[in-house]
Image (cartoon, rainbow, N blue to C red):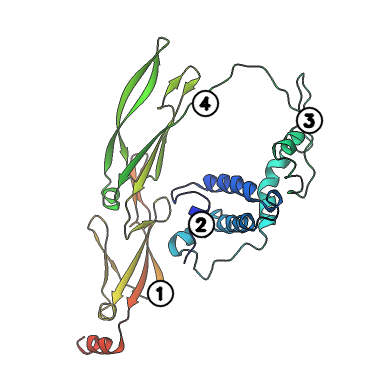
Amino acid sequence: MSKDYYEILGLDRYCTQEDVKKSYKKLALQYHPDKNKDNEDAKEKFHLLSEAYTHLGDEKKRKNYDMFGADNENFSMPEDPFSMFNSIFEEHVQQFQNFEMNYENNFDIGGMIQKLTGGALGNLFQMPMPNVHVKVQSCKENIPIDDIDIEVKTTMKDIYNKSTKEITYQKDRIKKGKIYNKKVTCKVPLYHGEILCKGNGNETGDGKGNVKINIETEASEFKRVDDYDVFYEKIMSVTEYYSKKCQIELPHGEIVYLKDCKVNKIHQIKGKGIPYQEEKEWFNGDLFVYIGVDVPDLEELYDQLNNY
């Protein structure tokens, strides 16, 4: 059974590359063998995390996985999960290496890392722990503003039809020092996987929060594999294949004809993917079509070809 690398990293298919990296770092630290002595389950989980990040952390490999799954013969396992782990975290540790600032209130970040991890991370990196001293300045505490999360359900048909959807949400607004509840209604396009409306969320004395709109597309034969690219699997009958008439009906009803119907091959049809708008001008992603043939048993095959 094909592995779900998104599930292993605790993510969904609409996550960003930054989300993939953050989730891997968090879980890899949690399940690293040096922190889980004699725990075979943690060791196995750590290797699975490394395998998942190998394929989702690289955009080309991720696109290949989204199309074909983990059973594709071009997939490969990570050679050394520990080496990959070190490379991910080394860049963060190096930011502090040989960096020293002396102020009135000092603390040692290197020592803090050791204390927070119970010393368990001391041998994870093949490099010395940083010697850093940073000033702790007294200032007014900024309370983080929670984002407003909104989920919108749609279909591929609506996306191809360039439809919009009206949404309504409540937010806190400050006016003359008092907090009011305001109802906001707006229309959003559906071709994005996620929309971030900066500064349109709750207001506090420290600023304005954001609104995150997640566009969830219902299951369909047409699958989004990139921002605006779409993958579709076309299974033809034997007689349909030999007729050399291969047509595909897009979600909004448009018919696309393929001149070349070679099987076991991915055909790229430019400009027939998801429509999207940039600076009031419309563009389209590409459609990737895999052609397969449904071969029946010999007796049925003979009848089909005899009647062809």
Mark 2, residue position = 5
Separation of residues labelled 3 and 4 (CA atoms): 28 Å
Single out the residue that lies furthest toward the left.
Answer: 307
Instruction: From the top left corner, tell me how far across and down residue 104 is, in percent.
Output: 77, 18
Neighbor class of circle 2 (other Cα within 10 Å; few <14, some 14-19, many 20+) is many
The residue tagged 1 is 264
Where residue 56 appears, x then y in whole percent? 53, 55
**218 up-or-down from 138: above or below:** below
| Residue at numbered disc 3 | 100
Q: Earlier in the sequence, mark 1 or mark 3?
A: 3
Task: Name the spot of residue 293 as percent of width and height, x first.
Answer: 33, 77
Place of residue 264 in the rendered image (x, y in percent of width and height, measured from the top left): 40, 74
Left or right? Give the position of 56 relative to 158.
Answer: right
Identity, as a three-letter code, of the amino acid under mark 3: Glu
Q: Earlier in the sequence, mark 3 or mark 4?
A: 3
| Camera-side residue of 110 and 55 | 110
Amino acid type at circle 1 is: Asn
Which residue is at the front of the view, 81 or 67? Answer: 81
Residue 165 circle label: none
Q: Nearer the viewer, mark 3 or mark 4?
A: 4
Say which residue label 4 marks: 144
Closer to the chain start, of discs 1 and 2, is 2
Earlier residue among tags 2 and 4: 2
Residue kind at label 4, given as amino acid type = Pro
